Image (cartoon, helix red, strand yellow):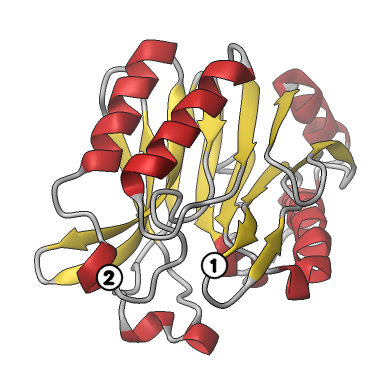
Amino acid sequence: MKIALIQTEIVWGSPEANIAVMDTLIDHAGKADLYVLPEMFSTGFVMQPENYAEKQGLSLKWMQGKARQTDAAVCGSLAVADGDKYYNRFYFVKPDGSVAVYNKRHLFTYSGEHEHYQKGNGRTVVEWRGVRILLQVCYDLRFPVFSRNHKDYDLALYVASWPESRRMVWDILLKARAIENQCYVAGVNRVGDDQKCHYNGGTAIISPYGNVVSDAADNETYVVVATLDMEKLKAFREKFPVLDDAD
C-alpha cells in the first residue's frame, strides 16, 4: 500500500480555504492508495464547536469527491455537529463514497476539549486494500492500552494538532506504538500557528521495528510518501511472534 501524509498549515476557522489547500496538495502528491490529513484539518483545533463544527458536511462531501477522483481513500478528523452534540470525528472515506467513523476517545482535558466535545465510546479498525487500519486522534497516542494490537490491525494512523512544546513526546510515542504493537504507524501533524500554539510538524511513517521509513521537514508544508510492505510485516510477525505473548 502506498500512503501519503499531508503536513500543512491550517487557516483558522476557514473550511473553504483549507479544503482548497488540501485539494492541491493531494493533486501534487502523486498516486497513492491512501491520503491522510491532520486533526481538524478544515478549521484548526477549535474549542468553539458551536461556531465552527460542520453541520452540512462540506468537508466530508469534498473527501468523498476526492476519494472518487483519485480512486484512493482519504481520511482525517473534523469538528462535527451530530444532533445536539459535537465530536472530534475521524472520517475514513473510500472511493465508493462509504465512510467509516471514529470519534476521538481521549479528549484533551488540559485544553478543555472535554467541555465542548462528546467522548467516543469505541475504537475503529478499517480494512482497505488488504491492510487493516486503526484510526486514532492526537491525544490517543498517550494511551497504549486503548491502542493495543489484538492481532486485528497492521497500520495505526494518528492525526494530530500536536504543539512544538511537546514534540519530543510525539516522536518517541509514535515509535513506541509501532514497536509494542508490531505494526506500521503513520503520524500526521500540522505546522504553523493557531491562537494558542505553534506546531512544527513531525509527520512520519514508522516501521514495525521502530525505524523512520519516511518523514517531513520541520515547519514546512510537506507530503510524506511511502509504500508499506505487508509481506515483510507478515514475515516479521511469524519469525518473532511478539503479539502471541501479549497480556
Disc ID at residue 220: none
Along the viewing direction, whichever of 121 and 85 lies nearer the viewer:
85
Which secondary structure, mark 1?
A: loop
Q: Is residue 116 above or below residue 84?
A: below
Image coords of residue 33 (percent x, y): 54, 18
Q: Is residue 71 above or below residue 54?
A: above
Please give the residue where the numbered disc 2 appears in the rendered image: 49
Image coords of residue 211 (percent x, y): 90, 42
Disc ID at residue 194: 1
Image coords of residue 181 (percent x, y): 72, 52
Regarding residue 148, the answer to whether it shows in the image is no
**Quadrant that contains the C terminus:** bottom right
Along the viewing direction, whichever of 217 and 87 lies nearer the viewer:
217
Image coords of residue 222 (percent x, y): 70, 36
What amino acid type is highlighted by mark number 1?
Answer: Asp
Name which residue lies at 87% across and 47% down: 210
Name which residue lies at 75% across and 56% down: 174
Residue 22 left/right relative to 157: left
Residue 160 falls in which quadrant of the image? bottom right
Foreground: disc 2 or disc 1 = 1
Verify CB contact (< 8 Å) between mark 2 and mark 1.
no
Residue 25 left/right relative to 17: right
Could you tell which of marks 2 and 1 lies nearer the N-terminus? 2
What amino acid type is highlighted by mark number 2?
Answer: Pro
